[in-house]
Amino acid sequence: MSKDNNLEIFPVVDEEGNVTGRVTRGEAHDGRKVLHPVVHLHVFNSKGELYLQCRPHWKDIQPDRWDTAVGGHVDYGEGIAEALRREAREELGITDFTARGLGHYVFESRREKELVYVHATVYDGPITPSSDELDGGRFFSPKEIADRMGRDFFTPNFEAEYKSFFAADGESSIAPAVAGD
């Protein structure tokens, strides 16, 4: 069983992403709500299905929930693109992909406040979920996602992000948009 390193250093940012300081993981997640950046990568296959990861039970935020394929903190001194590539490699073993930036937003929960940089890709190559960081993962159809929304199956931030960036009338609309680049 792994455990998050509460001494890991993250940048503190303003809502435009400008670094204003630094904070430990423990401080970022202890309810102080210090704004810190994270990256998300939504991985669609060419059939329009979305790959999701299952968060392990030992995670300090949202254990045992299904979440964005790749999600992770930006390390202090690291750029967004660099963090996205590192997290995709660490979590899913994906190294050869083209990500499309979709935007960013502030997500706030009871314990933390994140500046989330959202990306998507269409990828049909091999996916090897990290056994150290995840409890596996799989592709979900748009219907499977719609049927599980609001049932404590997904993380709240995945649900909000999916509705905001990808869902139109309950159906996924991203795969054609990402593939159209």
Image (cartoon, rainbow, N blue to C red):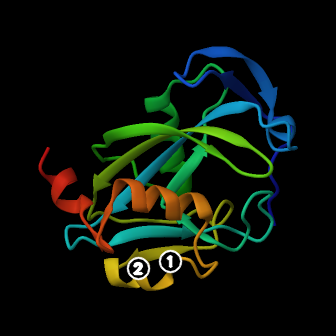
Q: Position of residue 142 (x, y in %)?
A: 33, 77
In the image, 38 versus 164, the foreground residue is 164
Mark 1 Cα-neighbour bin, 10 Å: few <14, some 14–19, many ≥20: some
In the image, 56 versus 162, the foreground residue is: 162
Residue indicated by mark 1: 149
The residue shown at (31%, 43%) is: 99
Residue at image x 54%, y 22%? 17
* Cβ atoms at labels 1 and 2 below 8 Å apart: yes
Residue 61, percent from left and from top = 75, 58
Residue density around tag 2, few if under 14, some if 14–19, many if 20 or more, within 10 Å: some
The picture quadrant where one finds residue 163 is bottom left
How many labels sit on residues? 2
Find the distance from the CA under tag 1 to the CA under tag 2.
5 Å
> Which residue is the site of mark 2?
146
Q: Quadrant of the N terminus?
A: bottom right
At label 1, the amino acid type is Met
Picture quarter with the C terminus: top left
Q: Amino acid at mark 2?
A: Ala
- Percent of width and height locating residue 21: 74, 15
